Amino acid sequence: MSSKDPNKLQIELNRLQSRLDLLVAYGHDKNIVEAYGHLLAHIKSTPSETYFPIVKIMQIAKINDTESLLSIVEFFSSVLDVVYVYLTHDSDIEISAESYFDTIENGSNPRELLTGKVIDKFQLDRLSFYCRINHQLLA
């Protein structure tokens, strides 16, 4: 690939910019469009950054509500992968999306993604997620 060829991430960011431009043209909610724009500009300007915890996304996008956060994650789903985790004092234990939502909806104990082991004595407030740039776009 020559230095003039855009990489996969840049191509996808350009697609998102086109979608964002359409949202603006059709008068979509100004606040969420601005939030999308903030995160898009940030990712474009710092392409080596790949890890985006919830708090960072909210700060970059200048939002403070869960509904907007989820809208942003959905809008950027072609660029960002969601990683569900159970936070411990020592580390983050990755869990599947299915386990995450089953825990929230049914109160069942989450299971470790790699081992399938049930996480005992879990606390619901330790369930979380973060986003990372889709690794296939970085190749």
Image (cartoon, rainbow, N blue to C red):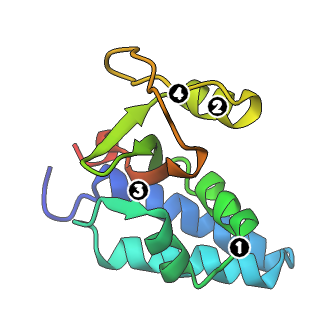
**Helix, strand or loop at disc 4?**
loop
**Helix, strand or loop at disc 3?**
helix
Residue 139 coordinates in the image, percent (x, y)? 22, 43
Q: Are marks 2 and 4 in contact (CB under 8 Å)?
A: yes
Q: Residue at x 76, y 71 (%)?
A: 23
Q: In this image, 76 relative to 113: left or right?
A: right
> Which of the numbered marks, if any, corresponds to residue 11?
3
Q: Residue at x 28, y 54 (%)?
A: 7
Q: Which residue is mark 1?
A: 65
Distance from disc 1 to disc 4, alpha carbons, whole Å, reads 25 Å
> Which of the numbered marks, if any, corresponds to residue 103?
2
**Helix, strand or loop at disc 1?**
loop
Distance from disc 3 to disc 4, alpha carbons, whole Å, reads 36 Å
Closer to the chain start, of discs 3 and 4, is: 3
Closer to the chain start, of discs 3 and 1, is: 3
Q: Nearer the viewer, residue 27 or 129?
A: 129
Q: Which residue is mark 4?
A: 110
Distance from disc 3 to disc 1, alpha carbons, whole Å, reads 29 Å
Amino acid on which disc 2 is placed: Thr
**Helix, strand or loop at disc 2?**
helix
